[in-house]
Image: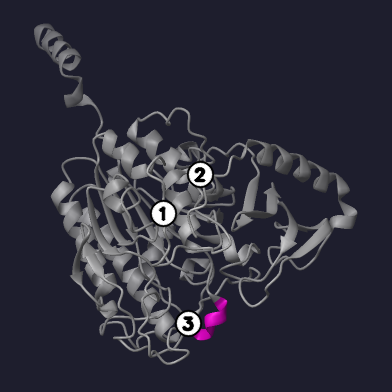
Amino acid sequence: MKLILTLLVALALTLPSVFAAPKPNIIIIFCDDLGYGDLGSYGSPVIRTPHLDRMAAEGLRFTDFYSAAEVCTPSRAALLTGRYPIRSGMCGNRRVLFPNSKGGLPAAELTIAESLKGAGYATAHVGKWHLGLYEGSRPLDQGFERTFGLHYSNDMDARADLPKGSVGSPTPPHDGWNVALLRDGKVLEQPADQTTLTKRYTDEVVNFIGEKKGAPFFIYLAHTFPHVPMFASPAFKGKSHAGIYGDAVEELDWSVGEVLAALRKNGVAENTLVFFTSDNGPWLIMGDQGGSAGLLREGKGSTWEGGMRVPGIAWMPGRIKPGVTSELAHMMDLLPTALSLAGTPPPKDVTLDGTDLAPLLFESKPLTARPFFYYRGDQLFAARLGEWKAHFQTQDGYGRPQAERHDPPLLFHLGRDASEKRNVAAQHPDVLARIAEAVNAHKAAIVPGPPQLQ
């Protein structure tokens, strides 16, 4: 027996990889314009989301999770780089990239996919990209081995004679937009059949999981919906109490269920972190096709809470204990968290704005207190420190051409007033002073990148 034990120890020392725990898989599921109040687990009384509700019940649901921007291009840049978008130049007066934009995510920016690919991960992007069309900024240039989806938002490349109001119609024309569906940079279908997108994205992810289950993988699933124009497959159209918007969200919920089922079927659920969130708040000016921010104020395009506080659910059965957390976290945290799980050190000479969430996710340890900064384009509009939020400028998401400046800043206690209705600045000058100190330190450390959205 002693000889056998000696041999086993020797084998363990000479072949450590045999005994080492496999690196965790990572999946980020990213919705487009999904509001804080659009899921059952976040209070929706009309949209049925049983798979996401189960995911939230089995995992950790964040009440205070934030996008890093109020619209999609900068938020996606922040997610993949772990940096405020002003650092990469992926923000500005034009707000998002358009088909005629000349810029994109700079090749010098290091993404989650690039870091994980270097650590031996298989990497796949599925869904909307919206980070650039040209060499250096495309998915295959930014660390993804495979890509399947759309270049940009599904309302772009509109037909020239499209009737006014079609984009926000509950029955938009199927042939109204010429946006292409691509695989690895090559056009598969143009225009894309948008009624099939959620299912085809889901099938792509399920197949990738089955193919790569024997080695670590990273999947970035960036859904097209519920961005307008709104479409759902025949299996879901007309089934929701919330119209076509609800149909699209309920199909997204089905998609999440299929992805989690594929992980279980392939025996990798316990070794896969899945994180579900949205790029920004709901597009309220679209009416019934615009979703809900719940009790939060305003929506997409604004730095009020409804524009940037979004659902956030982390799931890893057996590793993440079921619960709800009010810890402040944001999508820039996902890159350092992914690198930590992969055992990869953070990049040198790169300023990251996120923190590793692993202690919170796996040990229920509180995060170190830190400020969060709300940008609209390249302008700092607000800052949060603890439960306090100060607004230096405010502007509704759409419809108001100029921002309103506030001196002194507006001040809200988000723990008592998440709807931002009661300005208490006059009672708390000391809080405003602490927030101003954090803002000054932040501004001193920011070096804006060359503008990319012209």
Nearer the observer: mark 2 or 1; the answer is 1
Residue at left offset 70%, top offset 56%? 415
Residue at left offset 59%, top offset 65%? 307
* Near-viewer residue (44 or 23): 23
Find disc 1 in the rendering and name its residue.
104
> Is 113 drawn above or below residue 101 in the view shown?
above
Mark sitting earlier along the chain (2/3): 2
Find disc 2 in the rendering and name its residue.
83
For the residue marked with disc 2, what is the amino acid? Arg
In the displayed orientation, state which residue is furthest to the right. Answer: 426
* Near-viewer residue (342 or 313): 342
Quadrant of the drawing holding the N terminus? top left
For the residue marked with disc 1, what is the amino acid? Gly
The residue segment tinted magenta is 284-288
The reply to whether discs 2 and 3 touch (Cβ–Cβ < 8 Å) is no
Could you tell me residue 114's position as x and y percent? 32, 40
Mark sitting earlier along the chain (2/1): 2
Residue 322 visible in the shown view = no
- Residue 285 part of the magenta segment: yes
Mark sitting earlier along the chain (3/1): 1
For the residue marked with disc 3, what is the amino acid? Gln
Spatial CA span between label 3 and label 1:
29 Å
Could you tell me residue 239's position as x and y percent? 35, 86
Please, what secondary structure does the residue beneath circle 2 have? Answer: loop
Spatial CA span between label 2 and label 1:
15 Å
> Is 21 drawn above or below residue 94 in the view shown?
above
> Is 346 drawn above or below residue 30 in the view shown?
above
Quadrant in the rendering for residue 433 = top right
* Near-viewer residue (49 or 203): 203
Find disc 3 in the rendering and name its residue.
289
Spatial CA span between label 2 and label 3:
31 Å
